[in-house]
Image (tube, rainbow, N blue to C red):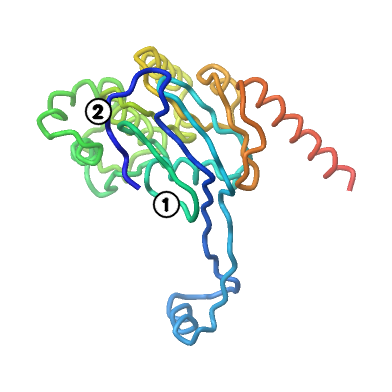
Amino acid sequence: MKNITEQIGLGEPCIQLNDVTVRFNMAGEKVDNLKEYFVKLMKRELRFKEFCALRDVSLTINKGESWALVGANGAGKSTLLKLICGILSPYKGSVRVRGSIAPMIELGAGFDPNLTAKENIYINGAVLGHSRKFMKEQYDNIVEFAELWDFMDLPIKNYSSGMRARLGFAVATVVDPDILIIDEVLAVGDKSFQKKCRDRIREMQKKGVTLIFVSHAKPPVLELCEHAIWLDHGRICKVGATEEVYEAYESFLDEKTKKTAAK
C-alpha cells in the first residue's frame, strides 16, 4: 500500500478502509530460545495459531475531521493506526490514504538511542521527508517548543519518556501534515506541556489537518475529537459522535466490572 499525496478539499475522503482484516500467526507452544525456534521450524514441529487483530473493518474519514479510537488494550487500535500509516498491510480488504502523514505511534520511533537529540532531529526529519536545509531552518523552533535547550547534546538513550515525547512531537508537527496520528504520546510529560501540545493540535485542526487520536484519558478525547470509533477484539462496536461513543464504551466497561465482581 502506498500513501497518495494529492490536493483534496475539506470534507473529501482522505482515509478509506473497506472490509479490512489483519491477522497474525502466533506460535502455539512455548519456545525457550531462538535456536530451538529454528530447529522446530525446520522440522515442521512448530505449530501456529491465527490471531485476528482487525476483523472486517470499514471506515471513511474525511479531510479536516477529528477522530478518537476508543477501546481496551488489545482492541486493535494500534493495529489500525499502523495500517493507515502503511506499516502493516491488510490480509483482506483495501486501504486508501490520500495525503501526507505525521505519525506518533510509538515513543522514540525513528530515534537512534546512541545519537544525540540534535543528530536525531535531522534523522527524524529525513524520515518525515524534510531536507536537511529545512530542518536546519526549523531547528530553533523545534528546540524551543520541546523546551530541551540544555539537553540537545545528550544521547536519546539518556532521555526520559517525557523528553522523547516532547522532541518527537516537536519534530512531527514542525509543518502541518495532511493527517496527524497520535497514539498515547500526550499521556507522558507534565500537564503544562500536554496543554501546549493540545493547543498546537487545535491550531493545526483550524488549518484543516485531519486528526486520529488514541488515549485512555477521557478529557483530551472529548476536547480534541468530534467523532469516535469503539473497537473491541478487532471489531467496530460503535461509530458516531465522541461523547455518544464514549458513553457506550463506559457503560460496557461498568457492566463488565459488575459481572467480574459477581463471580
Comparing labels 2 and 1, the label whose residue is closer to the camera:
1
State the image coordinates of residue 241 (x, y, percent, origin top left): 61, 21
State the image coordinates of residue 205 (x, y, percent, origin top left): 40, 17
Give the quadrant of residue 125: top left
Compared with 16, 227 (above or below) is above
Q: In this figure, which residue is indicated by the disc labeled 2?
A: 150
Q: In this figure, which residue is indicated by the disc labeled 1?
A: 89
Q: Nearer the viewer, residue 191 or 72?
A: 72
Decide which of tag 2 and tag 1 comes sooner along the chain: 1
| Number of residues whose C-alpha sits closer than 10 Å to that of mark 2, classed few (under 14), some (14–19) or many (20 or more) | few
Q: Residue at x 56, y 48 (%)?
A: 54
Q: Quick check: 118 left or right of 52?
A: left
Compared with 37, 93 (above or below) is above
Residue type at mark 2: give it.
Answer: Asp
| Number of residues whose C-alpha sits closer than 10 Å to that of mark 1, classed few (under 14), some (14–19) or many (20 or more) | some
Residue type at mark 1: give it.
Answer: Ser
State the image coordinates of residue 68 (x, y, percent, origin top left): 54, 28
For mark 1, give the secondary structure: loop
State the image coordinates of residue 190 (x, y, percent, origin top left): 46, 24
Compared with 232, 51 (above or below) is below
Compared with 258, 225 (above or below) is above
For mark 2, give the secondary structure: helix
